[in-house]
């Protein structure tokens, strides 16, 4: 099948019969090139004759043939260098000047490493963190977008089969019950950098605005920018799957459809196509009925089982990744608790709603928020056990956001308006001092945090303030954490330059969160904001406190100062040993 | 010319005469698809007849034609949806089950935004820094690699023409006198992700090891890893030029050649090719003699002048960027001093040699190091002035490294060995306290650094230690700075947990540099190391002090402690006002 010529916007396979080269006669003239067929040629002498004939060169005239790099072609050996479609000169002398310019056709199709290594060096480990959870996040992002308009509940499963000696049964499967993809959408999925903003609809017109057309998610007033609109650059999914493994099968059934569509891209396949001089970026989507396993080898037990499950699913998408990098396998198995906690942190507000993971008793009696419908579930399968270990991200209650939410005694909500129309929501939380210790949650995942030394009585003797060197703000974009961007503070909430009546430590007892939508830019790997901090620090940016949804007119600095003072006075329970007077030894006790 | 079919590893232009669709008869059979030509068809009815004939369907038999997304094709209007090469079904019923699978051809050529937006979101601003200097750095990297084997001096010029109302004369030109590129190398330059490691030599064999073949730079023993080997991923130059502008002309003359080769890639051209359904990744290299301006419009004054200069140049490469982003123009003009200083910092050791920019008197009498041969020059042209403002990076003496080098009173060299064979060189510098102030250089470029408040007498009253929150180490990769990776400290040189005899401030008076070669990985934009910190913190990593090139056997911790003690005792000139007793007002003065 691969011998059949591919069509459309892709490169053809090369066929010998229509091979040719372009030859410029540059002995002394400015004539256009001639296209000389090279099919059926077996020696340089034959080729030279064809050139002579094509350029009308008399048999007695001396001339040389050379590449555009001025390498002379003079024998079968040197003739071997020439590829189909190459450009050659006919010259009097190898070192003569080019009497007229010569245009040479070149092709510069991106190498397939664009896809295969796309994520490789982008998901860099920073501060010793393993970036693998962020690759999973890209797939969860896609599933959140796909399920945004679900009528019923939204389910995202990550199934890990990492425990089998048989590599065919070692894989990671991300499954959602979202809207799925039509064959055209599945095709578009594979096109690197084809973002939703430049995608064409079925009639070939560009959908200029992402908010119209089939891919639309339109939830402009979502609190905390929880709009599920987290597809942006057209690279995330591809980068992620090739960071995780080296082969991916996308299986999808669009809403309302009878059919399942399946497309595989893999490093191995790219390599094979390159070797066989086949079109690199061509492939086949398999359209079939749900549950049809006729194309799967019997040995692919896990995949067969999952495909059989299709009949019980409505619309869905399954990203099946194989060839998992072995370091990843070790990490995923050994650090299950850590990376699921990180995911719970990234999607905290999607999972728990705009107020975050408040203590259960506080919510009782409330109407469950619509966000409670998002289930993100990790299933870790072990060999020999029928039931996987299941972790629902919603059940995790020691992710950093949960700690911040639950260990705070007062909050301060505010809003920033940037350039007149871009809105940032924000919250500050006060973590009071309680009798003998700070209650500011410590980030056990951050390798920068070194445990404070303790004195003989178990009291911290360090002078590091509650949040230590940690910046105040974590930042969420369209509702999900952008992990590497942290914002230290703002002018109105940082430690004051001049001492105030308030002890300086109080300023170190606040944590904070910022939420923006996609009016602010993030890097393609969604690890950093590009312009958030700069824009927030702009002199034109205005801040105001929000109380019960209402904007207060008073200056934010004043509001904040009052709030933090109140926090200190009412919440900090401090026993302060002041004025150390020297040691008294009481041998009488 | 564009109507001619392109060849080789790229996509063809689409021609109407060989248009066809694939049709699967899926009424009840498992038969293979038929390829049905659609050339010369003007209505759906005609097409339907062809399908009937091709599938041997009798005129009385009812059937429907549908897309693989189950949209019925039943009229000229719906027929319009179909593209050449599409796959269609013949069915009994639009909603019937697929009785057998059907393979559908798809192409997923990366979108040209892969190239055009490659750098867009990668060069993200971090901490409020403008990343533009890092884009220039990618071009300087390429020029350093290209000039690595120059016999004579190595010259890299960045010429900026930003002051002309005429956009044709607004451009940035990076010119080096390196080895240039052959047409094939110029073609390879344009191929996204074609790194030197997977490039093919002229006979189509992959050059597996970067250290052999035409691109080789082999300087394994370069001190401070100053090996000029800074080409790695096959993306840097392309990302950089499209970050800076939207059109780039590469003009190059390979060493020893008569000819100049020229290739342009631009956003506009990509858009045009897309619009005209032409092959996106095809183009022409113009081969011509040096100084030949016949292809340039008369109005392109600057470019014409530069091309005319070619006759006086030997081998060279010129990267000519136009369509400069207007924010960049403002920044480049207004912040000339800042960004040139940043470049001087990035290439500090290339410009000044392994010891850095030591004070002139200290070097007098020494043999000039070979590195003194690298000239990196910025030329800023202004309208109406014949002579540009010229800045030689070597003349800059207020870049951070120069400040560190010149404001230190003692150094401590060391070496780390990671995983048995990967070597990291390092140096620590002591910046003593002098009478009334710390001499630790302050980083005026770092927006995080807030000037210390001063008391009435101009003395710093802040308690921030000398280096403040800054980490100790900056890190260089193959001799150039990787700007976003900073390493706080190591166990043996950080502030001790338990107080020692030494005042704690001393530990804040050290700056440091680490140098590695490409055994350590960096991200594709060369802004961060991937694994350096993790590997350095590994328990297996060994550190040893280097004195006069010799490795000391004593434990590094001990060596360091002795050194810093010595520094403090001999170099810190401290006047310490201790035991504040209250204010005395002397009205008598
Ligand atoms: N689980 C899914 N369900 C439905 N469609 C999906 C799913 N995953 C991906 N897609 C489709 O494939 C496209 C490409 O996904 P990919 O993650 O590679 O890029 P993106 O989401 O468009 O942009 P980004 O780079 O921001 O992730 C998506 O825009 C979406 O249309
Ligand atoms: N100034 C130059 N002189 C000669 N060759 C050059 C020059 N600039 C680029 N090239 C060639 O073009 C290739 C591609 O350059 P590009 O910067 O895009 O990627 P790279 O340098 O290979 O990898 P990286 O992504 O690390 O920069 C280089 O490897 C080199 O062979
Ligand atoms: Mg995505
Ligand atoms: Mg480069």
Image: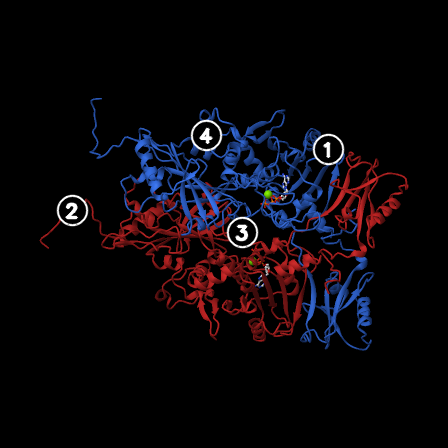
Chain colours: A red, B blue
Q: Total of numbered circles in the picture?
A: 4
Q: Classify mark 4 as within 8 Å of ligand 4 or not, answering yes or no.
A: no
Distance of label 3 from label 2 (alpha carbons): 57 Å
Element under disc 4: loop
Is disc 4 in the same subunit as disc 3? Answer: no
Q: Nearer the viewer, mark 4 or mark 3?
A: 4
Label whose residue precedes the other's in the sequence (1 or 4): 1
Crowd band around label 2 with a 10 angstrom C-alpha radius: few (<14), some (14–19), many (20+) = few
Q: Which residue is mark 3?
A: A122
Element under disc 1: loop
Q: Which residue is mark 2?
A: A583
Distance of label 1 from label 2 (alpha carbons): 88 Å
The foreground one among B510 and A410 is B510
Q: Which residue is mark 4?
A: B358
Q: Which residue is mark 1?
A: B290
The foreground one among B235 and A272 is A272
Q: Position of residue B270 (x, y in %)?
A: 69, 48
Q: Position of residue A86 (x, y in %)?
A: 76, 47
Distance of label 1 from label 4 (alpha carbons): 41 Å
Q: Chain of mark 2?
A: A
Element under disc 3: loop
Crowd band around label 4 with a 10 angstrom C-alpha radius: few (<14), some (14–19), many (20+) = some
In contact (CB < 8 Å): disc 4 and disc 3 = no
In contact (CB < 8 Å): disc 1 and disc 4 = no
Q: Position of residue B195 (x, y in %)?
A: 61, 48
Distance of label 3 from label 1 (alpha carbons): 40 Å
Q: Is residue B493 visible?
A: no
Q: Quadrant of residue A407?
A: bottom left
Q: Position of residue B190 (x, y in %)?
A: 66, 46
Is disc 1 in the same subunit as disc 2? Answer: no
Distance of label 4 from label 3 (alpha carbons): 36 Å
Is disc 4 in the same subunit as disc 2? Answer: no
């Amino acid at each position: 099948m691969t011998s059949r010529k591919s069509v459309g916007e892709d490169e053809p396979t090369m066929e010998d019969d229509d091979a040719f080269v372009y030859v410029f006669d540059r002995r002394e003239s400015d004539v256009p090139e001639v296209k000389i067929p090279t099919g059926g040629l077996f020696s340089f002498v034959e080729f030279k004759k064809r050139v002579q004939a094509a350029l009308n060169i008399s048999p007695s005239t001396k001339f040389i043939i050379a590449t555009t790099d001025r390498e002379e072609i003079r024998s079968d050996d040197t003739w071997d260098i020439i590829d189909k479609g190459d450009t050659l000169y006919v010259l009097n002398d190898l070192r003569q000047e080019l009497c007229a310019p010569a245009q040479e056709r070149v092709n510069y199709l991106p190498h397939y490493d664009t896809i295969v290594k796309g994520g490789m060096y982008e998901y860099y480990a920073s501060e010793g963190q393993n970036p693998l959870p962020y690759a999973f996040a890209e797939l969860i992002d896609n599933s959140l977008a796909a399920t945004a308009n679900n009528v019923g509940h939204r389910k995202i499963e990550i199934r890990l089969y990492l425990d089998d000696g048989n590599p065919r049964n070692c894989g990671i499967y991300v499954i959602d019950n979202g809207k799925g993809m039509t064959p055209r959408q599945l095709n578009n999925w594979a096109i690197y950098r084809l973002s939703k903003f430049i995608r064409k609809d079925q009639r070939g017109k560009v959908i200029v605005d992402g908010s119209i057309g089939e891919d639309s998610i339109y939830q402009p007033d979502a609190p905390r920018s929880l709009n599920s609109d987290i597809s942006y650059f057209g690279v995330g999914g591809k980068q992620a799957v090739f960071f995780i493994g080296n082969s991916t099968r996308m299986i999808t059934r669009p809403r309302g459809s009878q059919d399942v569509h399946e497309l595989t891209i893999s490093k191995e396949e790219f390599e094979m196509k390159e070797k066989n001089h086949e079109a690199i970026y061509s492939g086949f989507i398999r359209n079939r009925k749900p549950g049809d396993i006729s194309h799967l080898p019997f040995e692919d037990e896990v995949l067969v089982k999952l495909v059989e499950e299709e009949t019980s699913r409505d619309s869905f998408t399954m990203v099946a990744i194989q060839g998992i990098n072995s370091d990843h396998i070790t990490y995923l198995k050994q650090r299950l608790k850590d990376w699921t906690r990180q995911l719970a942190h990234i999607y905290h507000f999607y999972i728990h709603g705009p107020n975050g993971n408040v203590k259960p008793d506080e919510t009782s009696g409330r109407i469950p928020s619509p966000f409670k419908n998002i289930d993100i579930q990790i299933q870790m399968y072990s060999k020999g056990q029928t039931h996987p270990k299941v972790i629902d991200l919603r059940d995790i209650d020691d992710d950093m956001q949960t700690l911040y939410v639950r260990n705070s005694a007062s909050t301060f909500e505010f809003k920033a308006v940037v350039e007149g129309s871009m809105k940032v929501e924000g919250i500050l939380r006060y973590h009071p001092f309680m009798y003998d210790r700070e209650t500011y949650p410590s980030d056990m995942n951050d390798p920068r945090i070194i445990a404070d030394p303790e004195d003989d009585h178990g009291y911290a003797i360090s002078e590091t303030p509650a949040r230590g060197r940690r910046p105040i703000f974590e930042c969420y974009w369209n509702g999900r954490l952008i992990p590497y961007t942290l914002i230290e503070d703002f002018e109105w909430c940082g430690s004051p330059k001049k001492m105030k009546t308030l002890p300086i430590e109080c300023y170190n007892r606040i944590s904070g969160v910022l939420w923006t939508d996609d009016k602010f830019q993030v890097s393609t790997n969604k690890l950093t904001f590009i312009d958030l901090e700069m824009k927030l620090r702009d002199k034109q940016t205005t801040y105001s406190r929000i109380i019960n949804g209402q904007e207060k007119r008073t200056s934010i600095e004043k509001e904040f100062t009052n709030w933090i003072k109140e926090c200190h006075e009412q919440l900090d329970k401090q026993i302060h040993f002041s004025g150390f007077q020297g040691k008294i030894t009481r041998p009488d006790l």
